[in-house]
Image (tube, coloured by chain):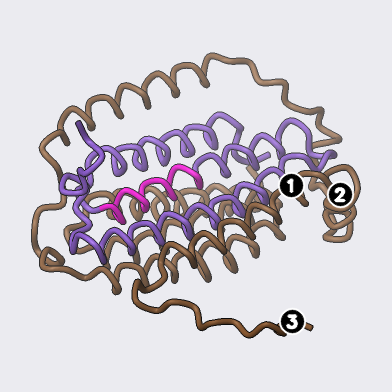
Chain colours: A purple, B brown
């Protein structure tokens, strides 16, 4: 293998950290969702790298990654529907202003 | 170092610049539309990673679903929720500095841990290019992984129905159904 496993994992960890920063620091709800998608991609890169280097003869890694992509699609659809519905009621998607459920 | 290794390393560097650079642009861009487009760039970099890791089918799935469907969905939602605060305003909340610190610490912990772990890498014969045909993946999805396959189908159905119900316009009540519908 040209690129050893720890380098793949480092790239995935960096992408995860970047996505986590997006989730924690964005003001727009859709910006938070973009960070979540980055984190899911980082997990997928991890899965496929582990599959390729540790168990290349089994299919579990790729199947798991396909399921993660499917779950990401479902979560993006549901999350965006919530955001659109909240925008219709409150005319804002800034997460600080969507606060009717706070104490 | 063979030519193939050199090409792989070069591709890895270019793809890392795409993925991580696109990711940084996603989380720091002021224009939300630009952030969504940079997400497409980052996802394309991840697709290149899958090709480099000999997971060709997964790369095409990533292209079709992530870039082709999820990104377009996000762009539509951005256009539908275009409010007064769209362009030029600061997109960081006031806790961004502690978020950056925490995220950096998490990254350092992850990197230190993974570089010190001895991974059970497979033997050299198994590491040669695996021949995972699409037929094998299909057989796995309806064979050993049939139950997760059904569960995720149910999940997608529930998410679809839920998204429709949530994003429905308020005033449009469903038309009064006749007594003999669906016969």
Please name the residue shown 24% across and 62% down the image.
A89
What element does badge 2 sit on? helix
Magenta segment: does it hold B2? Answer: no
N-term-proximal mark, 2 vs 3: 2
Q: Kindly identify which residue carries mark 2.
A: B140
Please name the residue shown 10% across and 37% down the image.
B94
- On whether disc 2 and disc 3 are found on a single subunit, the reply is yes
Q: Position of residue B43 (x, y in %)?
A: 47, 58
| Highlighted magenta segment, given as a residue range | A29-41
What element does badge 3 sit on? loop
Given residues B117 and B148, the one toward you in this image is: B148
Q: Kindly identify which residue carries mark 1.
A: A63
What whole-number distance in Å separates the C-alpha atoms at marks 2 and 3? 37 Å
- On whether disc 2 and disc 1 are found on a single subunit, the reply is no
Please name the residue shown 83% across and 60% down the image.
B134
Given residues A7 and B144, the one toward you in this image is: B144
Given residues B89 and A44, the one toward you in this image is: B89
Magenta segment: does it hold A36? Answer: yes
Residues at discs 2 and 1 in contact (Cβ within 8 Å):
yes
Label 2 Cα neighbours within 10 Å, binned few <14 / some 14-19 / many ≥20 = some
């Amino acid at each position: 293998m040209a690129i050893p496993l720890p380098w793949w994992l480092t790239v995935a960890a960096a992408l995860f950290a970047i996505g986590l920063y997006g989730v924690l620091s964005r003001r727009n709800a859709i910006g938070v969702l973009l960070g979540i998608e980055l984190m899911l991609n980082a997990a997928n890169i991890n899965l496929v790298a582990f599959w390729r280097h540790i168990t290349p003869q089994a299919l579990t890694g790729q199947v798991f990654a396909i399921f993660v992509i499917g779950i990401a699609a479902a979560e993006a659809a549901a999350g965006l529907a919530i955001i659109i519905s909240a925008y219709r009621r409150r005319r804002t998607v800034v997460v600080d202003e969507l606060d009717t459920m706070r104490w | 170092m063979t030519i193939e290794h050199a090409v792989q390393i070069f591709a890895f560097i270019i793809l890392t610049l795409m993925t991580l650079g696109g990711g940084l642009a996603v989380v720091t861009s002021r224009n939300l539309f630009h952030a969504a487009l940079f997400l497409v760039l980052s996802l394309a970099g991840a697709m290149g990673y899958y090709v480099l890791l000999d997971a060709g089918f997964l790369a095409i799935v990533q292209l079709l679903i992530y870039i082709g469907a999820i990104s377009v969905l996000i762009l539509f939602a951005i256009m539908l929720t275009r409010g007064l605060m769209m362009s030029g305003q600061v997109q960081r909340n006031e806790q961004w500095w502690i978020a950056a610190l925490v995220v950096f610490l998490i990254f350092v912990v992850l990197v230190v841990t993974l570089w010190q772990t001895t991974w059970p890498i497979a033997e050299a014969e198994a590491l040669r290019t695996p021949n995972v045909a699409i037929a094998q993946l299909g057989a796995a999805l309806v064979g050993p992984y049939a139950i997760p396959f059904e569960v995720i189908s149910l999940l997608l159905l529930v998410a679809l129905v839920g998204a429709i119900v949530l994003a429905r316009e308020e005033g449009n009540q469903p038309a009064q159904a006749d007594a003999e519908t669906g016969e």
